[in-house]
Amino acid sequence: MSESHFTVQYGDDIAGAAKQHARPEKSKPFAYGTAGFRMNADLLDSVTFTVGILAALRSRKLQGKTIGVMITASHNPARDNGVKIVDPYGDMLEQSWEKHATELANTPTGEIKQAYERLAREVFKSENREEAHVIIARDTRPSGKGLVKALTDALEAMGAKYIDYGVLTTPILHYLTRATNTQNDSHPYGEISEEGYYKKLAAGWKTAMQYKKPEGSLTVDCANGVGADALKKFLKYMPAEDDESGGIKINVVNGRTDDPSVLNEKAGADYVKTGQRAPESFDGKPFERWCSYDGDADRIIYYFTETGNVFRMLDGDRIATLAASFIGNIVEKAGLADKIQIAVVQTAYANGASTKYIEERLKLKVECTPTGVKHLHHVASRYDIGVYFEANGHGTVLFSQNALRQIRKADPQSPAQLEALTTLQALTEFINQTVGDALSDMLLVEVILAHQSGDGEHSIAKWFTTYTDLPNRLLRVEVADKNSFTTVPDTAERKLQTPEGMQGKLDELVAKYTSGRCFVRASGTENAVRVYGEAASKHEVDNLLQSVEVMIERGEAANKVAQSS
Ligand code: G16
């Protein structure tokens, strides 16, 4: 690309400020992964500084719109941290900018100013004097504070205005970003405050629950993360527990945010989903509803035990099917079925039985994308109502402008239609439109279960029996270089391109199992590869995954020998 020769405004102090946040000399290349940069917190200082430069640049490029920056490593252990950029409407950073983030993060400290100016010329095309606006939040990790300092040093060097909101859940920062940028629109997203978020969710809940009372209580495992603080604050805006319309008893467990070492330890959505087991502190009686958030409260997994202590888990696929089925139903009841098209977006981790249920029983379209909510969100936003969930419990439901218009202008012809429309309208209010949100998804599930209860059967047990999952397992295998595992483009990460020959071996293995399916991909948030498998029986799936693990380990050993000779 030819360089333009206009003067790049701002950033005169960058070189000096960068020296305070120097890139470690021997670090491996950094990459903007599934959810931004994520690694051991000790390596993140310089990366976070460069994210500050990029956030200011992005804001100026978008005529001064407010950009969000979240400092979190979500489900990872407490020693890790991460940083990601949120675009003005609360969705993830536009993918074409991820390469700019990666490039800046890998620039030697002494060359930062030149790299910034080169990038500014490339993205601005002409002189740009816009005011830059950035908002910031972090989770409860001890390293967060220092990383905010790296970020704000960059923002100050860039002459950007910023607000540091302190400790918040990831979805609240996404909410605030959108609320800030839509405050002058005809339909502002909400009040620009943490309190405004709680009020919006509670108001939607009250409307959706005006004719209902939830069955029993709900216990929430907060992974000892920021979700615990948020949930406790939120409950103050909810109807009293004994209120006939919408009162609900919610217990908070694993809410120790004073001790960072316990974050995500034997608790949280990832622990429950990956191990298919209950978290520490679980003492649920049969059919009592429990759910787990992750460390920054953007994922949720439900579970309960049946009589005899049999553990039953309801993951993101289950939430997607529950939501799609319920919403499809009320859209029809509201008389809008021919005006509103609903689709479900999943990834390759979705259990095959859930996909079959959505296509064959619900008769809805299913799309499959690579891992990462950024991919699912993008595809879901093409539909009137796009239900998207990853199996790990990360997801939400998006309502398009057309869907909102149709719901607003519909004229109910009967009390049943009025109830369906009121409920639908309430869902559009409290379902987070920016990103997966454990708190808002929890309300969605609770509203649906309350609407479906009342025939004597436990609503959570009824939910579990809608279809039977194919036995499945998820493995995490540590390898010397996860980047040597790449996938074939446009296969939604279901086929390996490298290591050479590995996909062929995998196909041969899978063919030996009844209804076998298996794929391997590098994690974008951890230093490992993930192996997912399904088969007709638990025994078969365990055997299949064991063989795949051995295959990967043999490949690693062969590589080591090749490198040392
Ligand atoms: C992040 C992403 C999710 C993704 C997960 C695991 O979640 O936002 O979309 O599913 O990482 O990704 P990977 O398999 O690439 O490690 P979170 O909750 O950790 O931010």
Image: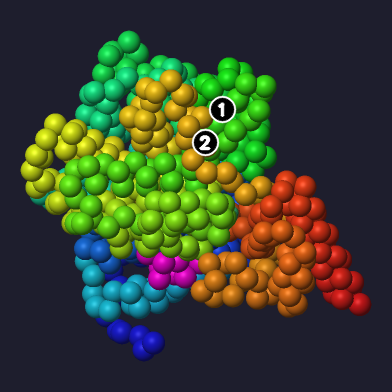
Q: Is residue 447 above or below residue 120?
A: above
Is residue 142 among the parts visible in the rendering?
no
- Asked if the magenta segment contains residue 100, the reply would be yes
Outermost top residue: 242
The kind of residue tagged 2 is Phe
Q: In which quarter of the image is residue 243?
A: top left
Residue at point 44%, 28% (across, down): 459
The kind of residue tagged 1 is Phe
Q: How packed is label 2: few (under 14 Cα within 10 Å), some, or many (20 or more)?
A: some
Mark number displayed over residue 380: none
Span shown in magenta: 92-102
Mark number displayed over residue 304: 1
Sequence-wise, which precedes: disc 2 or disc 1?
1
Question: Which residue is tagged 2?
Answer: 464
- Between 514 and 557, which is closer to the camera in this rendering? 514
Q: How packed is label 1: few (under 14 Cα within 10 Å), some, or many (20 or more)?
A: many
Classify mark 2: helix, strand or loop. helix
Residue 149 lies, in percent from the top left, at 46, 45
Whether the residues at callouts 2 and 1 have beta carbons within 8 Å, the answer is yes
- Asked if the magenta segment contains residue 386, the reply would be no
